[in-house]
Amino acid sequence: MNSLKEIAERIRGGKKVLLTTHIQPDGDAIGSLLGLGLALQYIGLSVTMHSTDGVPVKYAFLPGSRKIVSQVPSVSFDCVVALDCAETALLHPAREEIRGKIWINIDHHPTNTSYGDLNYIDPQAVATGEIIYFLLQELSVTPDKAIAQALYTAVSTDSGSFKYENTSMRTHYVAGKLLEAGVRPGEISPLLFDLRSKEAVMVLGKALNSLTLTAGNKIAYMVLTTEDLKSAGAGMEDLEGVVNYAKNIHGVEAGILFRENSDGTIKVGLRSASIDVSRIAAAFGGGGHKRAAGCLLSADLETAIREIISAVGKELP
Ligand SMILES: [Mn+2]
């Protein structure tokens, strides 16, 4: 692995820099892109900030977000920096289609494949944005409010508002420094965590209405039919976090959301407090993490519910 000092020198050494991130960007991807991108502009580099899937609406308030382009210009870059991207399969366009003299890979996923010419992977970092804060020190850039808001977005979203296990003293140190640089949590946090669309609230109501507890109240599940989604006017992005309402009930070991797709398949979201749901998802051709996983079933709703509940039931302590 290379040092941040080396990476800072290599970035500074070029004139034309491309910053890119993974497909379907999250708050860390956009925040890291903007935090580093604005800093490099301040020191006079020609920077292109790129996200194939654009900027999710909820991050559009971040200063500079309109400078992020969804197509890579067909020019040659002195340096390409991939941020928060564990493997090249998550890059679009493909690595071979981007002309960069050197590739720098900065990430915090433990699964990162070290595909860069220079790599900085820190799995202890709660977010790539946490690493970017220290990279800016090597670049001698003091974050202004715009940079600080971008990095705060990265750090606070990837740590689940400082709730997840990997939130460290260093995470809070960086957050504190970003507050010093002008971030006001009372101003930014509602935009990141509380505001939601009318459709999201409507569809949440439908999901809660379907809530069922089974297996001695250890499994809680909810069902959304295509009709529910249609009448709420809801899309995929409106379902974020819905399954947690089932998981977060006292005494529940597994929360499940069954969503009927228009093609007749059933998308299953699994969340757990204690059991390993990634194994259950994998048995149905899906995957994910121990506490959060998912799979897609080609079955009718009733069959999908019966099979999944039975599989989860076998894993209960
Ligand atoms: Mn991340």
Image: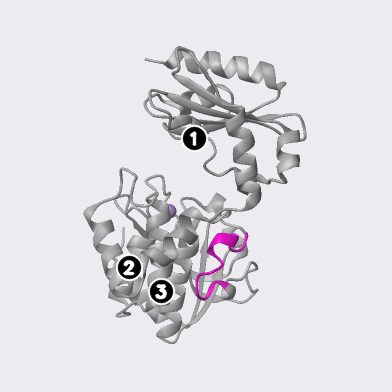
Distance from disc 2 to disc 1, alpha carbons, whole Å, reads: 34 Å
- Badge 2 marks a residue whose secondary structure is helix
Residue at image location 47% in from the left, 54% down from the top: 193
Left or right: residue 161 compared with residue 25: left
Q: Position of residue 201 (x, y in %)?
A: 60, 45
Q: How is the image coloured?
A: one colour
Q: Is residue 117 visible?
A: no
Query: Which label's residue is closer to the chain start, 3 or 1?
Result: 3
Tag 3: amino acid: Ile
Which is in the foreground here, disc 3 or disc 1?
Answer: 1
Q: Which mark is residue 61?
A: none
Q: Which residue is mark 2?
A: 133
Marks 3 and 1: CB-CB under 8 Å? no
Q: Which residue is mark 3?
A: 147
Q: Quadrant of residue 133?
A: bottom left
Tag 1: amino acid: Tyr
Give the magenta range.
53-65
Residue at image location 52% in from the left, 65% down from the top: 20
Q: Position of residue 306 (x, y in %)?
A: 61, 14
Query: Which label's residue is closer to the chain start, 3 or 2?
Result: 2
Residue at image location 61% in from the left, 33% down from the top: 207
User: From the image, which quarter does the C terminus lie in?
Assistant: top left
Looking at the image, which is closer to me, 298 or 193? Answer: 193
Marks 2 and 1: CB-CB under 8 Å? no
Q: Is residue 39 visible?
A: yes
Residue 61 is inside the magenta segment: yes
Query: Which label's residue is closer to the chain start, 2 or 1?
Result: 2
